[in-house]
Image (cartoon, grey):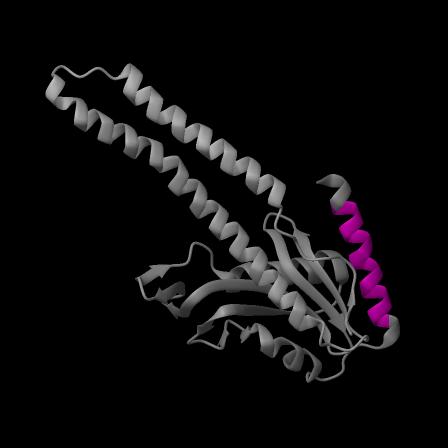
Amino acid sequence: MVIVHNKPAEIPVDKLVQLLFVLAITSIGSFALVVLFIPVPFQELEPLKLLLAVIVGIIPIIVGLKVIQSYTSGIIGEKKVAEELTRLPDRYHAFFNVYIKDSGDIDAVVVGPTGVFAIEVKRIAGGTLFVKDDQWYVKTSHGVRPLSTDPVSQVKRAATFLHKSILGTWVDAVVALVDCRSEVYEHRSVRILKAEELPAFISNRPMVLGERSIKEIVEKLENYIKATQIIR
């Protein structure tokens, strides 16, 4: 089994409960502000005022729930990828949520005999990804919409940063899909795979690193992660 050096992110239940509490207070406060402090010139307009208060009160809840859904969806996707990576043999090492300067975190980094892999996870339940004019879109039962971030550019930046600034060795960039699929399987030299395809893709690549090189790369990553934890 793959050697895991740090665990993937967990869903922080306590923080979600706190956020839901704040959303509830914000919603009630917004409703009360409209009811108590917005006058109406005619009594007949009171029902419209009440409707406005309800709408204003609901908006924070809708926005907050969308943020929670997006956040938890990402964590669920990362955990699925982490589970799939456990199928790799113990010659491989896995790191999760590695900080990348000016780009946030890269979801996973795998080091082993077949090289170093930076993995960006995308989870869009029931969606199909496609690219048009270098812009990524997702197609679902609700229609087509552009992705807010380009996963290929994101993982390429991470791979380049690790290669040039931290490890000094080539890093392959991979996008791993969870609960969705793609019409494109390679884009700008980045492989796009389903999460369950990751172990075979990684382990079947040509052997390029010996035990000594793997050990040195793992130590560099461990030291880098420790340093970024102190800074952050």
Left or right: 135 with respect to 208? Answer: left
Question: Is residue 118 visible to the viewer in this orientation of the structure?
Answer: no
Q: Where in the figure is residue 130, as x and y percent of width and height?
A: 40, 70
Q: Residue at x 74, y 40 (%)?
A: 231
**Residue 213 in the image, given as x and y percentages of width and height:** 84, 71
| Residue 72 seen in render | yes
Start-end of magenta stretch? 213-228
Q: Identify the image quadrant of the C terminus.
A: top right
**Residue sitting at x 11%, y 21%:** 44
**Residue 43 in the figure: left or right of residue 212:** left
Q: Nearer the viewer, residue 185 or 73?
A: 73
Instruction: Please tell me whether residue 41 is drawn above or below residue 175 in the rendered image.
Output: above
- Which residue occupies the foreground of this view, 187 or 84? 84
- Residue at image coords 34%, 36%: 58
Classify residue 137 by image quadrant. Answer: bottom left
In the rendered image, residue 143, in percent from the top left (x then y), is placed at 30, 63
- Say above or below: 196 vs 219: below
| Magenta: main secondary structure | helix
In the image, 145 versus 159, the foreground residue is 145
